[in-house]
Image (cartoon, rainbow, N blue to C red):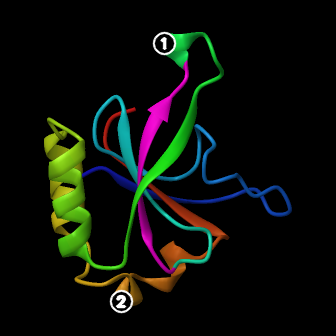
Amino acid sequence: MNITISPLLQGHPLKESDLHYPNIRLNARWRVIVCRDGVQWILQHLHGPETGLKACWDGRSYCRTKEALLRCSRLHCGAIDPVAEAALAALPETIETFPSRLASSSLAFHVGAR
């Protein structure tokens, strides 16, 4: 599985809606992020480019358990990349047990195709 951990620019944190915010990319239009405070996973949908607007990610579901995140992903996302599915399956049961070094705003993760 392709998982990389990379520090965000100190003093220049990305917005959660930013195209380059660390994520698990589920497919071309959907991704999962850890919120800036590390208290929930956010399922996000890409909006914008088809309407000529600047592309940005909007939150669709806010989940504290892996069960809820998987349910919302299956309900809304359509086909999910197999690497991303494996990454979701490897998440802990709750966000509280997600490694704090990944959930912090100073470190980030990227999984799956871009």
Mark 1 or mark 2, which has the lower sequence index?
A: 1
- Residue at the (42%, 40%) spot, across then down: 45
Residue 52 image-quadrant placement: top right
Q: Main secondary structure of the magenta part?
A: strand
Q: Position of residue 92 (x, y in %)?
A: 25, 80
Q: Is residue 46 magenta?
A: yes
The nearer-to-camera label among 1 and 2 is 1
Screen quadrant of the C terminus: top left
Question: What residue do we see at 58% from left, 49% from top?
Answer: 21
Place of residue 62 in the rendered image (x, y in percent of width and height, measured from the top left):
41, 66
- The residue that appears at 30% across and 84% down in the rendered structure is 94
Q: Position of residue 26 (x, y in %)?
A: 28, 43
Q: Which residues are magenta?
A: 39-48
Residue closer to the observer: 99 or 34: 34
In the depicted structure, whether residue 17 falls above or below residue 67: above
The amino acid type found where label 2 is placed reads Thr
- Is label 2 in a helix, a strand or a loop? helix
In this view of the protein, which residue sits in the foreground, 73 or 2? 73
- For label 2, the crowd category at 10 Å Cα-Cα, with few meaning under 14, some 14 to 19 and many 20 or more, is few
Q: Is residue 60 magenta?
A: no
Residue beneath label 2, please? 97
Q: Quadrant of residue 79?
A: top left
Looking at the rendered structure, the kind of residue marked 1 is: Glu
Disc on res. 50: 1
